[in-house]
Image (cartoon, grey):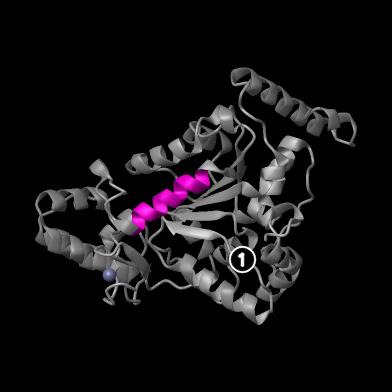
Amino acid sequence: MMCNFIDSINLTKSHKEQVAEWCELVRRTQLLDPSKSLLNQADAEEYSHVVILGAGASRATLSHPAYRGHQIPVMNDFINLPEISELLKKQNIVLTNIEEIYCYLEEKGEWNTINELELIISNEIQNYYLPDEITIYDLLFLCLGPNDCILSFNWDSLLLQARDRVIAKLASASIKTKLPNFFFLHGNVTEGECQSDSEYGRMGKICGKCQRPFSPVKLIYPTSHKDYSSDFAIKNAWEAARYFMSKAMAVTIFGYSAPKSDVAAISLLEKAWGKPKERFFANFEIIDIKPHEELVCCWKSFVFSEHLQSAKDFYDSTIARFPRKTVEAALGNVSGRWIDSSPVSQTMSWDEVLEFLRPVLASNALKNRFGRTAQ
Ligand SMILES: [Zn+2]
């Protein structure tokens, strides 16, 4: 059934070949599991775009000239902070991996040192602010829709800064819309929680149940036994990650290199995603400057055959090329109903982006995907 349209629309040869390839894959999947219902266009609004952020995304967001030569620190960069060097010297620690250091301190029961370490990291990373100009993180909130989800491995507050000001800019431009969901998979300096009441919220706020201020969430996890279920805020983030990954039609990995120390995290994402052969129709994209072949190798457990798209920067990604329509763009690859790209450009100002996106943002305020009224 999916092949009928091939000759009915004017396709280039490469498009024809691409559709034929999809059709063959559809046929093969049906043979593998005939009970599996194929992609149902009517249920398309149920699908999501999941964006996974690593350190490279925060660095790309702060690539503004004001930050030249002053990159936001990540994980092992913190070892070089004078306060941390001194702390390690006092404890006679010669390890250079922050998670291994945590592990060592945890085994010795040095909880005060662990708390001190997390406080230094938290204070340092809170010195970083978005420039006034519109950045990649602002565009993430504008270009993804309410069914989509941003999952960040980063501790910095840049994503939350972006969300707050996007809300303010939309209000001043009188644009009503809904923003994507977001969660921090490894904790965040802006997040606090109340362990006894299983409540969490922004640092500086109080727990709604016991009226006590939230405590900071845990930032460092020992490499040898990462447990994402002991901390309420993290457990909640991973439940959301599992949910959104399971219904993702598009995934973008941005600036995250899946380090060996994150093997537990990768395994959880893999399980939620399922077998690549059952996900051959989904769009799996990496924003990274590494060679395409290297990325295929790194993410092969997620990708069917070699169906991986890579973009050298954010503005070349599906998020920037199909704002608020990335799931439709991914579905177009399967159905052959390709949609035209309508990219946001790096040179646009705040006002230009908001005016450019106004129609598509406004459509998300009332309707879900494919134009149906939400309620
Ligand atoms: Zn409480």
Query: Residue at the spot x=72%, y=36% of the render?
Result: 334
Q: Which residue is mark 1?
A: 178
Query: Residue at the spot x=71%, y=22% of the render?
Result: 24
| Residue range corresponding to the magenta coloring | 233-245
The stretch drawn in magenta includes residue 242: yes
Ligand 1 in which quarter: bottom left
Q: Nearer the viewer, residue 336 or 211?
A: 211
Q: Position of residue 97 (x, y in %)?
A: 26, 49
Query: Residue at the spot x=59%, y=49% of the render?
Result: 49
- How many neighbours does mark 1 have within 10 angstroms: few (below 14), some (14-19), or many (20 or more)? some
Left of 133 or right of it: where is 197? Answer: left
Callout 1 secondary element: loop
| Residue that extends furthest to the bottom in the rendered view of this protein | 172
Q: Nearer the viewer, residue 95 or 65?
A: 95
Left of 212 or right of it: where is 94? Answer: left
The stretch drawn in magenta includes residue 170: no
Q: Is residue 287 visible?
A: no
